[in-house]
Image (spheres, grey):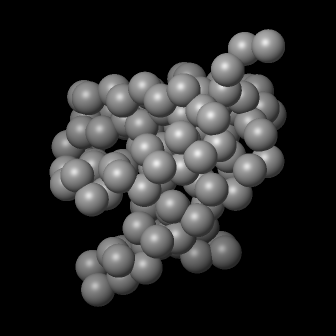
């Protein structure tokens, strides 16, 4: 049985994180990706960034990642800037708790 993989893609804004995540996930339903940016989209698809909501957005992203890992997806990709260690730590802990192999890609 192949070990499941959690991939963290970090890099500056517009460095290609989302594009790389989409390539990795492809059309596979067993591979999922997410980012903090998704928090700022309305149900109608309108993007409304509010810097005062960054902390709740990061909390949402960690919770969403935990949900995906608990569902047992073969690959989960989180693509955020990850400029600070505290932003990465919860994902490392989740990956370890769910038995996922971790890869960090720096763009």
Question: What percent of the width, then of the height, locates residue 6?
Answer: 54, 34
Q: Residue at x 42, y 37 (%)?
A: 8
Q: Is residue 33 left or right of residue 19?
A: right
Residue at x 31% of width, y 57% of height? 87
Between 6 and 97, the residue placed more toward the observer is 97
Where residue 101 appears, x then y in whole percent?
54, 26
The residue most toward the bottom is 52
Q: In this picture, is 2 found above or below 8?
A: above
Quarter the N terminus occupies? top right
Q: Is residue 22 visible?
A: no
Q: Is residue 61 left or right of residue 80?
A: right
Residue 34: image location, x then y, percent: 55, 50
Which of the 4 image quadrants contains residue 2? top right
Q: Residue at position x 70%, y 57% from top?
A: 67
Q: Where residue 65 appears, x then y in whole percent?
A: 59, 53
Between 90 and 79, the residue placed more toward the observer is 90
- Compare residues 91 and 27 and report the one nearer the observer: 91
Q: Which residue appears at 51% of the width and 62% of the height?
A: 61
Q: Is residue 52 visible?
A: yes
Location of the C terminus by quadrant is top left
Q: Residue furthest top?
A: 1
């Amino acid at each position: 049985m192949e070990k499941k993989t959690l991939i963290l893609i970090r890099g500056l804004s517009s460095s290609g994180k989302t594009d790389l995540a989409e390539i990795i996930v492809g059309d596979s339903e067993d591979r999922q990706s997410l980012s903090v940016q998704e928090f700022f989209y309305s149900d109608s698809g309108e993007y409304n960034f509010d810097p005062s909501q960054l902390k709740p957005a990061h909390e949402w992203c960690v919770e969403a990642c935990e949900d995906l890992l608990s569902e047992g997806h073969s690959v989960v990709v989180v693509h955020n800037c990850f400029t600070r260690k505290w932003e990465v730590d919860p994902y490392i802990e989740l990956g370890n708790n769910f038995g996922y192999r971790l890869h960090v890609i720096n763009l």
